[in-house]
Image (cartoon, rainbow, N blue to C red):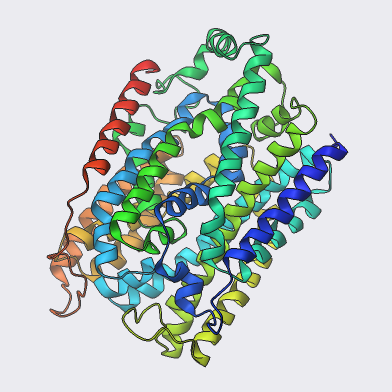
Amino acid sequence: MQLATLDIVVVLVYFVAIFGLAQFVSREKAGHEKNSTDYFLASKNLPWWAIGASLIAANISAEQIVGMSGSGYAIGLAISSYEWMAALTILIVGKFFLPIFLKNEIYTMPQFLEQRYGPTTRTILAIFWLGLYVFVNLTSIIWLGSIAVTQVAGIDQNVALLILGLFALFYQLRGGLKAVALTDIVQVTLLVLGGLMVSWITLTTIGHGSVIGGFHELTRRVPDHFNMILSPSDPHFNDLPGISVLVGGMWIANLSYWGFNQYIIQRALAAKSLPEAQKGVVFAAFLKLITPLVIVVPGIAAVLLAPDLAKPDDAYPTMMRLLPTGILGLVFAALIAAIVASTASKINSISTIFTLDLYAKFKGQKSNVEDMGGSEATTPGERHLVLVGRITACLALALALITARPLLGHSDQAFQYIQEYTGFFTPGITVIFLLGLFWKRASEAGAITAAVGSFILSLVMKFATPDFPFMNRMLVTFFVTLALAVVMSLVWPNAANRNRIDTANVNYKTSTGFNAAAAAVVMILVALYATWW
């Protein structure tokens, strides 16, 4: 498939416009040079709309669009539980986690671990997250993105990898998180509109001009793709094991991802205030509710429109071929927007963790980010930290480009692959943070035990019980590591002055608007699951 001239023009206009916008919002006042607070936390001044949009733009990339659409093709609407249950998880994060993080001026998740447990935990988890972000998340984003670009534009996949990676790198290199977050409202708007266009075209094709008719025809002809809770006899039960998506292991994955993942939570940590951050997560929760319409429905439609695909992950790019000239360019630009936004966000988080949690600590340097009440001056040391962050961003991208094909080149459903192998670590991470936030006696010995125990137990269960659903494996691992962490904390408690996280003076009260929005999200979720149980 080749793009028409008009499509190419639309894509090029997008590239120029979004790059120009990123540089425009990255500018500083005359005489002010960017410091670590500016670069890594957007000057701690993000508004709610930027937080909400950036949360979704960081989350939805090729990993979701191509990968989840592929899972929609293979499994059906049940894969939407990752999105719909995330909407509820985001609200829990806003209600219970953000008040503690912002009260204690947390800027990275490893920094929280040091203040709560000690420096060893911070270093261990910082190194773990860097490895996960570079070799699992960043590689998957650009790899799946390159698949889509290759299939739609007809260019060599290696060239697509390079173009996507370099554009995302240079797009955020100057402005850091500010450049990413303040342009994400444009990216998300384009993403939602583009996805809705794909859904519209596919459904009207199936329904002979009627969207509603197309949806009814889809549910009639492939009813097995509209079961939200899979039965044990379903061939994909191991991927989404029935009721576990509502009350089981999916909660472990979601809490870890939305609550304790630097890549995601960094936007909320950069809010100008707690109420602003909470309004942002409400915005993100409602966007999450409509995500399956943008991503999963085209994959299900492909079951009828392209039943003989070589791989499920080919579903979304194949559906894009139905789009008319000009619209194809717009939707293609939306896909690139998602890839670029998510890649840039990941690169920025990698540079943040390496620079502030490893490099600055090793050098014994206290950044402006860490000294929130101190000077905002840009000292030589601050300029050096920003430079280190930019160099780290370049090196992280280079590693991801080199390793993307060896790691993901043979995967049929990359989204499920990512969920399963990330799940080796998420139970331990969830235990560490939940105990750290809500149990004062949790110690560093308990935290390290949870981190190591989660990986070892997951690995043993993976090979000893290969047919056991990975989501259920996460749940079992969570409770076992929770018990181990509690026992170790009681046997080897922390020193009396080790815990520097203040939870006693945290106000968990939320506004009437937040509470009403949370109730609305719950009611919508109940209606959705009741309809397609």
Residue at x 29% of width, y 27% of height: 523
Does any portion of residue 138 appear in the rendered image?
Answer: yes
Q: Residue 288: where, in percent of width, then height?
A: 44, 38
Give percent across and percent down for residue 28. 55, 75
* Count of numbered marks: 0
Q: Is residue 414 visible?
A: no
Quadrant location of the N terminus in the rendered image:
top right
Towards the viewer: 237 or 506 = 506
Name the spot of residue 73 as percent of width and height, x first. 60, 26
Residue under the image location 83 percent in, 48 percent down: 156
User: x%, y% of residue 48?
Assistant: 40, 53
Which of the 4 image quarters holds residue 272? bottom left
Q: Say above or below: 492 vs 140.
A: below
| Residue with the most extreme front position | 30
Q: Quadrant of the C terminus?
A: top left
In the image, is residue 182 above or below residue 154?
Answer: below
Q: Nearer the viewer, residue 331 or 45?
A: 45
Q: Is residue 435 left or right of residue 401?
A: left
Q: Residue at x 78, y 50 (%)?
A: 12
Looking at the rendering, which quadrant does residue 221 occupy?
Answer: top right
Q: Who is closer to the viewer here, 522 or 466?
A: 522
